Amino acid sequence: MHTIDVRSDTVTQPTPAMREAMFTATVGDDVYGDDPTVVELERQAAVRLDKEAALFVPSGTFGNQLALYTHCNRGDEVILGDDCHIVWHEAGAAAVIAGVQLRTVESRKGVLDAAAIEQRIRVGEDIHWPRTGLICLENAHSNGRVIPLEAMQAVCQVGRRHKVPVHLDGARVFNAATALGCDVREITRYADTVMFCLSKGLAAPVGSILAGPADFIARARRHRKLLGGGLRQAGVLAAPGLVALNEMTRRLAEDHGNARYLAEQLAQLPGIEVQLDDVQINMVWFRFSGHVYTTALMASLADAGILANPPENGMMRFVTHWQVGRAEVDRVVAAVAAYLAGAQ
């Protein structure tokens, strides 16, 4: 019985094509800028996102924090959603690395109100105020929902009106494009800089991309070195990134379909409440209507060969990826059903 891991789409093993690409990759020294595989990944990523330049970075958090650090001066204020990844899951790095203040806006399941953002922009000069240095958006959101293009456009217009740059945490931006049925450029056009992960749903073992104007990326490259992110023969890591960019982006609809199937199957179980409207990419959020003995639940899933994260604040999440197909989904549903039957 093989183990099924639905904790996240970060848990994926590299595909056979990725392992072969790593083995045969041509490499150089990326700090000197002469690793041809990294250079090619950055070139292709910039083209895909319709940005002037791109930079290969170790992780999504690294990419987001590098963006904040490069956009902002110390003491600046960054406006962003109160439930976004940068606020909740990046270890307070904005205070440590960029030295910025985060000013949050109420999020409606990931959608930010452009007027509320505009009200928070510091207009004029006052010695008591921080400077508004950046606006951050997230699409797809880490809650699994996709942000409509009109909402992004409205925020982008506010930023341009006040000459405040917009950064997109696009960790799963290709999932968002798949769900919206659009080219990824239709999303990234509304941000000055973009970060996306190669190591989430795209299954590369390591790495993310930060993209934007050429002068911004030149500054970010220096900051990457300062933060310890200067890599040497990084082509062995960039090679699977190229597979991720060119092949894995084309199959995300399969993950979305499996997540929808998983959600619908779970919803048929007594004692499960699934947020079906929130199943827009590869995430399924649900709660148990009765009391859950978390230790017993996790032990039951583990005995069935299922790796999952325990409920948090009453909510539980399963995530599909290239190693979770219909057969795996059926096993997961059966394991949950078995727990519920035993908990009667």
Image (cartoon, rainbow, N blue to C red):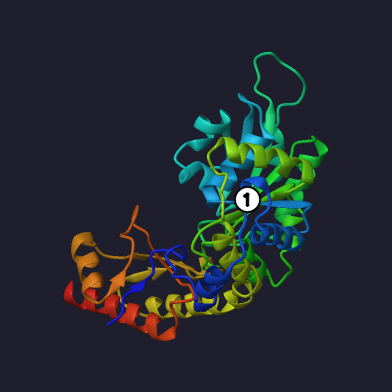
Q: Residue furthest right?
A: 161
Q: Quadrant of residue 341?
A: bottom left
Q: Which of 318 and 56 is in front in this view?
A: 56
Along the viewing direction, whichever of 15 and 343 lies nearer the viewer: 15
* Residue located at (40% from left, 76% from top): 267
**Image spot of residue 37 (x, y percent):** 65, 62
- Neighbours of disc 1 within 10 Å: few (<14), some (14-19), many (20+): some
- As rendered, which of 67 and 217 lies closer to the eye? 217
Q: Can residue 344 be seen in this view?
A: no
Q: Please tell me in which quadrant of the rendered image residue 338 appears.
A: bottom left
Name the side, left or right, on which 279 lies relative to 156: left
> Image point 62% across, 37% down: which residue?
223
Q: Which residue is drawn at 79% across and 52% down?
A: 52
* Quarter of the rendering occupied by the C terminus: bottom left
Q: Position of residue 15 (x, y in %)?
A: 50, 75
Residue 29: image location, x then y, percent: 61, 51
Three-letter code for the amino acid on which mark 1 is drawn: Asp
Residue annotated with mark 1? 30
Name the residue furthest bottom.
Answer: 327
In the rendered view, would you say 55 is above or below 120? below
Q: Position of residue 247 (x, y in %)?
A: 62, 75
* Quadrant into which the N terminus falls: bottom left
Quadrant hosting residue 126: top right
Dot 1: what SS?
A: helix
- In this rendering, the count of numbered labels is 1
Q: Which residue, as the protein is rendered here, is positioned at the far top?
A: 127
